Amino acid sequence: MTGAWSITAVADQDTDTAAAILELLRDYNKQFIGRAPFGPFQLAARDPAGCLIGGLLGEWRSYWLHVDILVIAEPYRRTGLGSALMAEAERATREKKYRGIFLDTFEFQAPRFYEKLGYTRFGCIQNYSDGHDRHFYEKRL
């Protein structure tokens, strides 16, 4: 069916089409890894007054947790909050009996932080953005 198609951008608000694209992938993958779960995982950290001071955003993907964002407000860095958020992510991953967690980070962000938590670097894109390398980590649980 070469040439019997059209390609259009999907609008941000068109969540139905985005969901249908994901279903196409899940349907294909089913023959290899079963109907793997997919969905959001989100944690928020707040101070005693209820103000947001950090959080973790990720997705469950094929029996793994992908951590997309881990951020801590400057005054709360190096207080153990990042480790606590990652520990909660690991706890949730273990509770689901999933394989592990994977993530990426720039060299100016937190590679040594993840290494101290037992994550193993499995790849790097050198000069990913403006001379900065992007590192990829995993931790099997």
Image (spheres, rainbow, N blue to C red):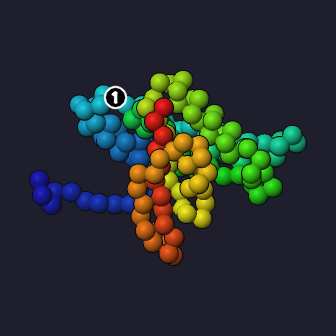
Q: Is residue 72 left or right of residue 122?
A: right
The three-letter amino acid code for the residue at tag 1 is Arg
Residue 38 coordinates in the image, percent (x, y): 44, 35
In-image side of 5 versus 65 (left or right): left
Q: Foreground residue, 31 or 5?
A: 31
Residue 99 placement, left or right of 119: left
Q: Quadrant of residue 3?
A: bottom left
Location of residue 127 in the rendering, given as x and y in whole percent from the top left corner? 45, 72
Counting every numbered tag in the picture gives 1
Q: Residue at x 60, y 65 (%)?
A: 108
Q: Position of residue 97 (x, y in %)?
A: 47, 24
Residue at the outermost bottom position:
130
Mark 1 lies on residue: 35
Picture coordinates of residue 139, whole percent (x, y): 48, 40
Is 128 located above or below residue 11 in the figure?
A: below
Q: Nearer the viewer, residue 95 or 7?
A: 95
Q: Residue at x 71, y 52 (%)?
A: 72
In the current view of this chain or complex, which residue is farthest to the right?
A: 49
Q: Going by the image, does 51 lie left or right of 112?
A: right
Q: Residue at 52% of width from left, 30% of height from top?
A: 93
Foreground residue among 68 and 39: 68
Instruction: Look at the image and tell me whether residue 135 can be seen.
Output: yes
Circle 1 packing at 10 Å, graded few (<14), some (14-19), many (20+), is few
Q: Up-down: is 66 above or below 71?
A: above
Secondary element type, mark 1: loop
Residue 15 showing in the rendered view:
no
